[in-house]
Amino acid sequence: MPVKLEPMPPRSGYEAPAAAAARSLVESTAAAPKAFLTHCEKTGYAETGHYAETVRLWQKMAAASPLAKLLTIGKTAEGRPLYVLVASKDKAFTPAAAQATGKPLVFIQNGIHPGEISGKDATSMLLRDILITKRHAALLDSVIILAMPVFNADGHERFSPWHRINQNGPREMGFRATATRLNLNRDYLKADAPEMRAWLRFFTTWKPDFFVDNHVTDGMDHQYDVTLDMPTEQNIWPSVGAWSKDSFLPRLYERLESDGHIVGPYAEPRDPSDWSKGFDVGVIEPRYSTTYVALWHRPALLVETHSLKSHRTQMWAHYDIMVHTLELVGAEGPRLRALISTAEREMAQLGARYDPKSPLFLAGTWSSAGEAFTYKGVAWHEETSVVTGQPVRVYESQPVDIPTRLFRKLKTTAAVPVPLGYLIPAAWTGILDVLAAHGVEMHRLKQPTTVTGETYRLTEPKWAARPFEGRVMLTGVTAKRVRATQTFPAGTVYVPMTQPAARVIFNWLEPEGPDSAVRWGWFNTIFEQKEYAADYVFEPIARELLARNPKLKAEFERRLATDADFAASPRARLQFLYEQTPYYEADKDRYPVVRVIEPLP
């Protein structure tokens, strides 16, 4: 039985001096009509409103402004509608109309983790300042805004003061996972959740040019009120990554610092007990929002305000980041859209001609090439934990700058050449459904077709000991590419790589991708042997096999002499010989998806 407690929210020992004024928030509230105040403002930033209350406010703003329309894009597992508000000076409320304006589309997402909800309240205030008070109406001169109030609406409504133990407010908040306990920010590629399927339909239809994902981070106390991350390395097209790293981020940092924010990179210490050993920047796998968006060659900004700062301070950071982002993207709109178009064209060219000497990045880890970095921490001391008996850190309030290193460059650990396309047997409907959810173009062979291609032999599989996001993941496998010519029946699905979704396809269908269908366990049945040989039936076959094949007999005897485990296992000895016969299942361990490396006839 849980012990009765009063909530004890943690607090940071240090807040940026400018946070006390939070000028942008104060000015926004002062200018707002009473009917358009958020629940958060009405309660002095102590509370956040329920989902229905937030939706009503956004509906009211859309009804009051001819420049806004609130779209329903799908439903949650519990049946709640999901919304995106489109704000456009040109009243471009369809994907075609929005693209025709030539303005960049900026997609702002909130509430994927509903406990981390300060972005929702800040976005409500900013939309009000654009559509109602018109304080920031000029932003729509150069951008179209797509804003999602809450992604995980079911989790948002699981209100409690007992969520997010590591966070300083609001008083009550939603739960991290969906109603089926899925973390949406691990679901972008596998797309298990209905919420994610709805999101993907919206994203792949509208194709926004820039993405902002508002979060509140956990972690150690420090001076930063916000940390930021964007894909800039091999996990995004080079020209788009360079724009994010060299053009966008430095200017965003400069503007935020001029507002009084203390901003740094979203990074984890290599050794939590010794920060001087350096920090690894950001996330790599496409299961996460920003890395998934990068597969579409779009810049994606991860915003992580700090959980130990007040809810008001978090909102202040979110608000200013969104204003400056919209300004910067608007000013760079033509250049950014040109970079995205060029990246799409170059990726299509890569998929139009098979080049075995040009592998494309699939997986990586942080390299040892770091850069000098000053981490803005706070002083701390250690006390002995009454629970563990081990030292536990106690943060103080004095700011401390720590010389260390920042590791943002990636070392490639898996890369393979891009094929012309993939052939998928029609029976693998689950794999095809996920591709369809990502807006992938596919067609079926109308007649039997003989093709030279490559597939994989997958051996030595290892699975996780526990489920992760509802699936038992394959944590390791040896993948060997095998070239073969075979005939595929009519109805086999062909997925060409000369399309905008090419890099999504590549990451889903290449087994070595960290979020591939193979890794997520969608092909686990290929590792299962379905037929077995009874020893009394196999004995005469084995005798004839050894008599007819001296090399096999020699290998069998060598194994008996050198491998004690093999020699002691009747099952292993029988299995070794059984696998040399035509009775053994030819498709076991064979990846059924084929890489097409020559044009289809």
Image (cartoon, rainbow, N blue to C red):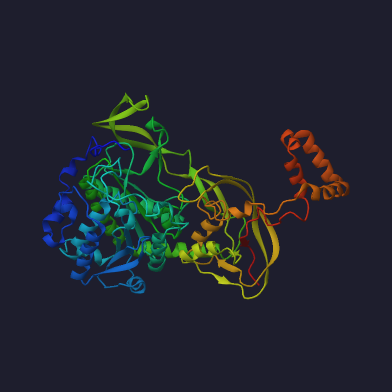
Q: Position of residue 71 (x, y in %)?
A: 30, 68
- In the image, 229 versus 213, the foreground residue is 213
- Is 60 rendered above or below residue 4? below
Left or right of 470, for residue 545 = right
Question: Residue 576's image quarter?
Answer: top right
Residue 25 in view of the camera: yes
Whole-percent x, y for residue 532 in the image: 72, 51
184 lies left or right of 502: left
Q: Residue at x 33, y 73 (%)?
A: 94
> Residue at position x 39%, y 64% from top?
198
Nearer to us in this view, 540 or 464: 540
Query: Farthest residue in the right direction?
Result: 547
Quadrant of the image containing the C terminus: bottom right
Q: Which quarter of the rendering shows the N terminus?
A: top left
The reply, left or right, for residue 120 in relation to residue 526 is: left
Residue closer to the observer: 549 or 126: 549
Q: Residue furthest front?
A: 1
Q: Is residue 377 above or below residue 328?
A: above
Residue in the foreground of this view, choosing between 57 and 360: 57
Residue 323 appears anywhere in the view: no
Point out residue 432 in the picture as x, y percentages from the top left corner: 53, 64
Residue 134: x, y in percent?
Answer: 17, 64
State whether residue 422 is above or below residue 8.
below
The total of numbered circles placed on residues is 0
